[in-house]
Image: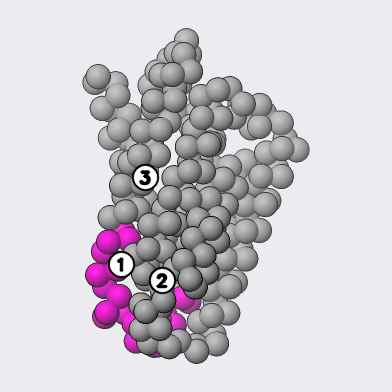
């Protein structure tokens, strides 16, 4: 139990550190509201679960050990984050924000839950650092001889804590929307998130 609690403490520190998943989820909540933020969080969590189970089942090690596969995931992830960042910067540059427009249009009617979910899923699944973290950290807490169920428990605990953190961000962002809905503020949010995504893209691209 002490080992598991130590693992959760480490995961908590890692989870609250800024990253592409939190930036994307926060932007969705600020721009489109709580529904979009929660759906984005669900997409991120689903991808995190896939990566965790891949690591637990041994397939993650194969991906990381195979340079062509690892490089493919890395460059696809970097390109996707770059696209998200460029899109946000373009939105900020256009500046045609309609105050409160998003509040009256449910995310399901505007873009579709599927599209928002896919953005969160792709943001996480194409980040090789998530898989590498699972492979590097899990054995240090469970030992090399641990079975798949134990590894899966630890990996899914990482996903659960991450989901709780993102949910908290969504709730806070949704409450702040009334203050942050002014076009000038929206432009700053889009520009800041765009720059952050491009920075995360560069970080993923330099992952070894």
Residue occupied by mark 1: 173
Q: How is the image coloured?
A: one colour
The answer to whether residue 188 is above or below residue 203 is: below
Mark 3: which secondary structure? helix
Mostly what secondary structure, the magenta segment? helix
Task: Please give the name of the residue rendered at 28% of the width and 28% of the height, measured from the top-left corner.
Answer: 6
Q: Residue 106 carries which label?
A: 2
- Whether 54 is among the magenta residues is no
Q: Which of 74 and 24 is in front in this view?
A: 24
Q: Position of residue 13 (x, y in %)?
A: 32, 43
Q: How far apart are marks 2 and 3 (CA)?
A: 25 Å
Q: Position of residue 44 (x, y in %)?
A: 47, 49
Mark 1 or mark 3: which comes first in sequence?
3
Task: Please give the name of the residue rendered at 49% of the width and 73% of the height, measured from the top-left corner.
Answer: 110
The answer to whether residue 155 is above or below residue 85 is: above
Residue occupied by mark 3: 162
Which image quarter is the N terminus in?
Answer: top left
Q: What stretch is highlighted in magenta?
A: 169-191
Visible residue check, residue 22: no
Mark 1: which secondary structure? helix
Q: Distance between the residues labelled 1 and 3?
A: 16 Å
Mark 2: which secondary structure? loop
Q: Which of 185 and 102 is in front in this view?
A: 102
């Amino acid at each position: 139990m002490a080992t598991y609690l130590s693992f959760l403490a480490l995961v908590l520190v890692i989870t609250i550190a800024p990253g592409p998943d939190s930036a994307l989820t926060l932007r969705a909540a600020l721009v489109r509201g709580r529904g979009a933020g929660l759906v984005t969080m669900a997409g991120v969590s689903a991808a995190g679960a896939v990566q965790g189970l891949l690591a637990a089942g041994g397939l993650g090690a194969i991906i990381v050990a195979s340079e062509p596969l690892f490089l493919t995931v890395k460059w696809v992830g970097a390109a996707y984050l770059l696209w998200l960042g460029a899109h946000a910067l373009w939105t900020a540059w256009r500046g045609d924000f309609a105050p409160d427009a998003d509040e009256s249009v449910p995310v399901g009617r505007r873009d579709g839950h599927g599209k928002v979910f896919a953005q969160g899923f792709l943001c996480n699944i194409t980040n090789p650092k998530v898989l590498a973290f699972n492979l590097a950290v899990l054995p240090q807490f469970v030992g090399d001889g641990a079975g798949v169920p134990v590894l899966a428990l630890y990996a899914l605990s990482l996903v659960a804590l991450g989901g709780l953190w993102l949910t908290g961000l969504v709730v806070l962002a949704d409450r702040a929307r009334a203050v942050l809905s002014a076009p000038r503020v929206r432009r700053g949010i889009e520009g800041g998130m765009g720059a952050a995504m491009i920075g995360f893209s560069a970080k993923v691209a330099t992952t070894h």
